Every structure is written in structure tokens, then in C-alpha cells.
Amino acid sequence: MTVLVTDTGFAPDDWALAFTPLGTANDAPALDVPSDAQPGDIPLCGAVQMIRIDFPSSADGRGFTIARQLRLRGYTGRLRARGHVLSDQYAMARRAGFDEVEISEAHAARQPQSEWQFRANWTAHDYQARLRG
């Protein structure tokens, strides 16, 4: 089982449709994107409602770049980070454009909801907000 992390805390996964690996279908409602994908190769047709980007390691930040590029290209659907995202990286994930983070139950036990919620006010605590005073 997996746990979704949003600004309100932990929640069960509410996505019922299957994820299709990138490159196997362009009209799938949900795409699974590996961390080494090129953002320009990800189709943004109207059928795509959810894109899930893999984080194979907490030290692999390529998913943040992919998310930001998708948002800059105009993607407005659900964007989910999946895998080894740490609670310390939650604010960065939200600023990059992710709506939610999918983690394992074991990961949620090691980093409880309170650690994620501590970073949920991500718009008020970035360096630009502090500079603006």
C-alpha cells in the first residue's frame, strides 16, 4: 500500500485508474514517468489527467526539473512524485509543481505526518517570501 502526502497531511490513494508507462500510449489518462525522461517527450494531450514521476533515490533531483518543465509547458493536471522523496524535500516538490507525493507505508512510519505538515506552508517559507519581508 501507499500513502499520499498533500498539504493537509496523509491520505489514502484516491486514483483508481491504471498508470501507463511513458512511451507505450499517448492517450492514457495516467502516465508513469521515469526520472531520466526528457520533459519534451512527455505528451500533454487532453486525455492525460495524471502524471506520476519516479524518484528512485532521495538524492536524484531530476524529477523536480521534469515537474517544473511540465508546468512551464502548460500542464495543469495532477502531478505526483512517487518514491524516495523526503519530508525535507516536500516544500521543493510543491514549488516545482507537484500536487502530491506518494510514499510507501514504511516510509510514512519513518517520517510521520507531522514532519510533512511542518513543511506544508511551503509558500510562506521560501527564500523569496523572506526577502520580500
Image (cartoon, rainbow, N blue to C red):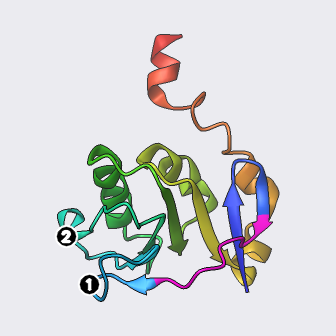
Assign a secondary structure to mark 2: helix
Residue at the top extreme, as displayed: 133
- The answer to which of 51 and 26 lies nearer the viewer is 26
> Can you say which quadrant of the picture contains the C terminus?
top right
Q: Decide if residue 25 is on the left or right side of residue 104.
A: left
How many numbered callouts? 2
Q: Can you tell which mark lies on residue 98?
A: none
Write the start and end of the magenta stretch as one range: 11-19
**Helix, strand or loop for the magenta stretch, by majority:** loop
> Can you say which quadrant of the picture contains the N terminus?
bottom right
Assess whether mark 1 and mark 2 are in contact (beta carbons under 8 angstroms). yes
Identified by mark 2, the residue type is Asp
Residue in view at x 45 percent, y 77 percent: 57
Task: Name which of mark 2 and mark 1 comes first in the sequence.
Answer: 1
Which residue does the numbered mark 1 point to in the structure image? 23
Assign a secondary structure to mark 1: loop
Q: Residues within 10 Å of mark 2 (few under 14, many from 20)?
A: few
Image quadrant in which you'd find residue 131: top left
Q: Residues within 10 Å of mark 1 (few under 14, many from 20)?
A: few
Q: CA distance from mark 2 to mark 1?
A: 8 Å
- The answer to which of 102 and 32 lies nearer the viewer is 32
Q: Decide if residue 82 is on the left or right side of residue 109.
A: left
Residue in view at x 51 percent, y 32 percent: 126
Which residue does the numbered mark 2 point to in the structure image? 41
Determine if the magenta segment contains residue 34.
Answer: no
State the image coordinates of residue 48 (x, y, percent, origin top left).
41, 66
Q: Is residue 89 above or below residue 22?
A: above
Residue in view at x 31 percent, y 84 percent: 25
State the image coordinates of residue 89 (x, y, percent, origin top left).
53, 56
Q: Is residue 81 above or below residue 84?
A: above
